Image (tube, rainbow, N blue to C red):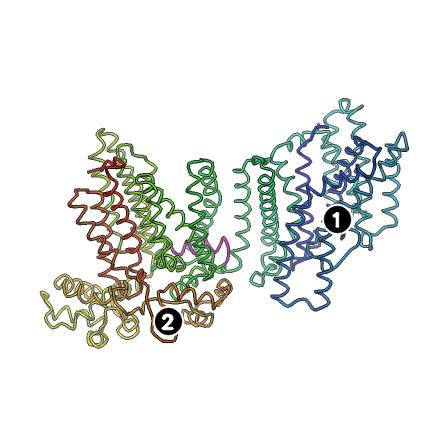
Amino acid sequence: MERNKSIDFYRFAFCLPVILLHISVSTTLYDERFTLGGNAVEFFFVLSGFLLGKYIKKADEKNIFVSALNKTKRQIIHIFPYYYLCLFATLFYRIYINIKFDSYGEQDWVQFINNFVAELLCITGITYRTRHINGPDWYVSALIIASFLVTIFVMAIKRYIKKWEYVCEALSIFIFVIYIQFFDLASKYGNIVRAIVNIMIGITCYIIYANIEKKYEKKIPIIIYDIIDIVAVSFCIMCLFPNNLIEEKRIIALASGILIINQFIGKSHFSKFLDSNISLFLGRISLPIYLGHLLVILKFANNPRYDMTQWKVQSYLAIVAASILIGIIIDLIITLVSCKLKKKQWDYPISIRKVAFIISMLLFIISFANEKVFFKFDNLGKQKICVYVICKIIMILLYIYLPQVLIRLVRKKENYRWWRLGILIFAIYAVSILLAWPGNWVNDEFGILGIVQNFGIKYHQSFFTSIFFIVMIMIYPSCGSIILGQAVVCTIISVYIIKVIYEQYGKIAYCLLVLFFSVPTLYFILSPLRVCMYTFTFLLLVAILLKLTNKFENIDYKILGALGIVTAIVATWRTESVFLIILIPVFICINICKKINTVAVRKKMIIFFLVVSLLPFGVFRNINQLENEATKKNVLLWSFVTGLSVMLQDEDLKSPDLEEDISNIDKVMPVEEMKRNASSYDFYAIYNVIGPFEYTDEEYTKCVKSIVRLIVCNPVKYLEAKWDLFTYSSGCSSEFHWVEPANSTEQTQNIIKMYGISEDILNIFRTLNNELRSAYIYFLTGMYTIEGTEVLTYYFFWNFGIPIVLLMVMFVVSILRKNLTLCFVNFMILLDFALVYVAAPTTHVMYFFPFYILGYATVFYQICYFIKKDKYNHKENL
């Protein structure tokens, strides 16, 4: 008997009605169309009986008990790893939700524990029980017990009766008729009786199949097999759903038997079409899907944040997709453990790429249910619909493209060390995030959540930030998913940076881990605003630039394109970095002209880089220009007003028309109030007292021109006015009032009210342990109290002025060493720092954190270059 893989497809297909039944009866999604889906289990019993018939025919009937025991032992070895994994997973989750919702009384808990013991011993198939742990457990129990009993019974007939096959057929028919007439499936012993009857039918089906294969297989036309397939499948489908044509639903057992015979014969066109590795894979995951799907249903059924009845179709699709996904994961776990224990090579009926693709599609389907938890779909305009579609496209690209890239990288042995390094880095970040779950949400980030809830964009924080928020919440509706997504991005970039340095200078590159595991880095990975993502993206830009210029003669268009796109992103993400879109293309074009001798290739490269950098920048820039005009104007004024308020204290200001400038400023923001509340860092005083509040377009234009003129005419005075802001923001000062520990839930509610946004945000803002979260984030801020006193001490690492000084030193060194590439990188970062210094409106440390990462990482690279230049024969591009 050759195995036809089409039978595996039907094993998967018959799982789906069972899942639909359990969704219908276990949740608020009741649908009478699915109430008879449990009849699909008949197929599995009959199939088991069919395979049992094959075993009995070949088994030695001299030792009946040993043969039955061996068969049962094989079933246990195959089924029990899945059975117990699903049982304990469901047990722990049930305990969690029962305690959380206080849904069990004392008697319920007693019955719950008793049932767990019964399920642990796999004896629940004998009688029906309530308060079960994992519902499908009865099937495994009934299957094993019934198979053992039927094997002994049939082998005894085989031993003592010569024509045992005819006797088995007659007995099966007789038992089936008695079963239909007198036994009710809801009776106390219905499960075990049901299993015995259907297994006997399966054995009869095997006997029929063996006779057909031996005598009639070649004589029957293929069209007959096709008709049998169609009729059997039609009967099965009709028996799965309520209908008026067939009153007795147990007829599915007979239809299943006919279908199984036809698939093992394998002559029909449909059978041949389904005879593939995909069908084999689907059949393989049918058991873990069947045993594990109740865990998924419990998760959805006990989710108070998700109105399942409002999104009925999506809910059904999401639960079925999640059930398939959990089945794949369980099967992968069991396969991996089995291969490790048996020291076998990975053996799977389908390629890992196809598994990844299937998982990606299932996750994408589940996202349609996840997004209903938080997002609001009422009155969406064209712009918001576009945002939704863009985010869905990004999601599907992430789900499909990223796993395929990772699989390709994993298969290369030279990448193993980078996988291990990535796992280490992410593990540290994940532990930090769990300690502070769901991260350090303080202020403006709640404003972003309020806007993205309706698929709006917070342009002030760049549309990249809003898009990232939306995509992460679509993947899983939690504030913590945003922080975890950020940690994944930072991990990938960190590994890439170390890899770039390792390829040039060796194992010394691992020293950079100190930077990525340092306290400030951990603190800002917990912060959901753009500062962390922007910082690591800027660092990626520097790494790509250094890698590209290091081997310009053998230039790779992929890395050239990556540099252009990353440049466009960094130049757009923060306004202060807009100069990069001019500086980097000029630098690259000069290098291309110097390093590439062929004129045609040179032109092609220059045009290519300008397109991949300027075109995305133009698109990104125009999107950000959609921001409310009044907000853009206020943001620009706030960037300069803190320093201006201090500078106006000086009576010796220079300007071509000082009085006119002061008058222009006074019409928008009262100068006397600025002087009275003069501060280079007290942004909130300016926001609440000084304004600006109301002004015309003409007044605004004149005010900006006057501010710029005063700054240009008095640059030293303005820079001195901003000094306090820099010292307080970078840790140079002893006053550390710029760090922000975690908010309590009550503070979060107040902030939400302040922004005037929906309290639905609290549905995805849930801390694991608020006390631990607050203590951990307070520790990361660099402050802790000396025991027995009220004196605060501070971490040295928080002084962000040090890397800036080091950058300045290395800038001079690179000039003296005539290394124009390193000189350009230092100049680029220092210029960005200068613009931030001039424009930073508050003492929030996020303005200067980028230069902590960029400063130390870049200086580290330069030290490696200058120390190991001769050893590694490093050729510089001058």
Q: In percent of the image, x 26 and y 30: which residue is there?
A: 601
Q: Amino acid at mark 1?
A: Ser
What stretch of residues is rendered in magenta? 465-477
User: Could you tell me how many numbered marks the image carries?
Assistant: 2
Q: Is residue 75 above or below residue 678?
A: above
Q: Nearer the viewer, residue 839 or 29?
A: 839
Tell me residue 227's x, y (percent).
Answer: 74, 32
Q: Is residue 21 above or below residue 99?
A: above
Comparing labels 2 and 1, the label whose residue is closer to the camera: 2
Q: Look at mark 1 in the image and give the residue it sits on.
A: 141
Would residue 543 be found to the left or right of residue 478 on screen? left
Closer to the camera in the image, 226 or 422: 422
Residue 2 vs 469, above or below: the answer is above
Label 2, on which residue?
785
Image position of 780 (left or right of 817): right
* Residue 119 in picture, x, y percent from top left: 72, 53
Residue 799 in which image quadrant: bottom left
Q: Quadrant of the C terminus?
A: top left
Given the current orientation, which residue lies at the most extreme right position?
161
Q: Secondary structure at mark 2?
A: strand
Badge 2 or badge 1: first in the primary sequence: 1
Packing grade of label 2 (10 A; few <14, some 14-19, many >=20) is few
Is 716 contained in the magenta span? no
Secondary structure state at the residue bearing disc 1: helix
Real-space Cα distance between discs 2 and 1? 60 Å
* Secondary structure, magenta segment, majority class: helix
Q: Hey, which residue is sitting farthest top in the picture? A: 219
Which residue is most to the front?
Answer: 788
Q: Position of residue 757 (x, y in %)?
A: 44, 67
